[in-house]
Image (cartoon, grey):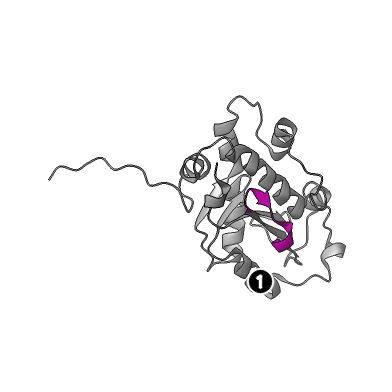
Amino acid sequence: MNFSSWPRLLVVDVEGNGTNPPDLVEVAALPVREGRPDTSTAGAWLTKPRHPVTPLAARIHGLTNERLEKEPGWEEIADEVHALLGVSWVCAHNAHVDYKALSAHLPQWQPAGVLDTLRLAKATYSDLPKYSLDALIEHAHPDLSAAPAQRHRATFDAYATAQLLIAMAARYDTWDQLVAAAVPPGLPGAPEPEQDPMLW
């Protein structure tokens, strides 16, 4: 895989307040450049949700209502998040979830495409019993020594997802092959199905 041929891509992860639909409480966006996560230009935001964080969500990511009390509301950071994402490609694990949440919070945002490491892992490691982020970390042993925060925080999960993406991408020869394996149908960047030739 020639990583220098990749378009601009950011690995994203979001954490929510536990409601449905969720309010965001944390967003991370980590660029991948030349086959490496670029933490020097990454973005990470905490935001106070409109509705309280549920006890279950707080137990998972550790972001309590007290911790978020003095953080800015979403409307205060939305433009900054949108500016970093721009029209780049994005990647996430189980990307439907992150894409749906970000799209709901950034209605004017439209990425060039969406890679899903869950879909990519099923194509790349076809014999695994599970494809959760934890299962893939255990299988692929990515280097997480420089990962910020801890598991279930957006910055850590984005870093882990980036390292998994890079490891799996090395098994593909071209960007187009990666896209074919990693973009879910119906999400931006999905390859167009080949049309049968029409008879006139």
Report the amino acid beneath label 1: Glu
- Residue 198: percent from left, percent from top: 19, 43
The residue at 60%/29% (across/down) is 125
- Quadrant occupied by the C terminus: top left
What residue did someone put label 1 on?
A: 80
The residue at 61%/24% (across/down) is 127
Task: Please state which of residues 46 and 161 is positioned toward the viewer in this rendering.
Answer: 161
Residue furthest top as drawn: 127
Q: Is residue 163 left or right of residue 55?
A: left
In the picture shown, does residue 194 fall above or below 111?
A: above
Q: Magenta includes 41?
A: yes
- Residue 87: percent from left, percent from top: 53, 63
The residue at 76%/72% (across/down) is 72
**Image quadrant assignment for residue 23:** bottom right
In the picture shown, does residue 120 fall above or below 102?
A: above
- Residue 121: percent from left, percent from top: 60, 35
Label 1 neighbour load within 10 Å: few <14, some 14-19, many 20+:
few
Q: Magenta includes 9?
A: no
**Image quadrant assignment for residue 160:** top right
Residue furthest bottom as drawn: 76
Q: Is residue 89 left or right of residue 30?
A: left
Task: Please state which of residues 159 and 79 is positioned toward the viewer in this rendering.
Answer: 159
Secondary structure under the numbered disc 1 in the rendered image: helix
- Residue 197: percent from left, percent from top: 22, 41
The residue at 25%/40% (across/down) is 196
In the picture shown, does residue 22 fall above or below 48?
A: above
Region of the chain picked out in magenta, as a range: 33-42
- Quadrant occupied by the N terminus: top right
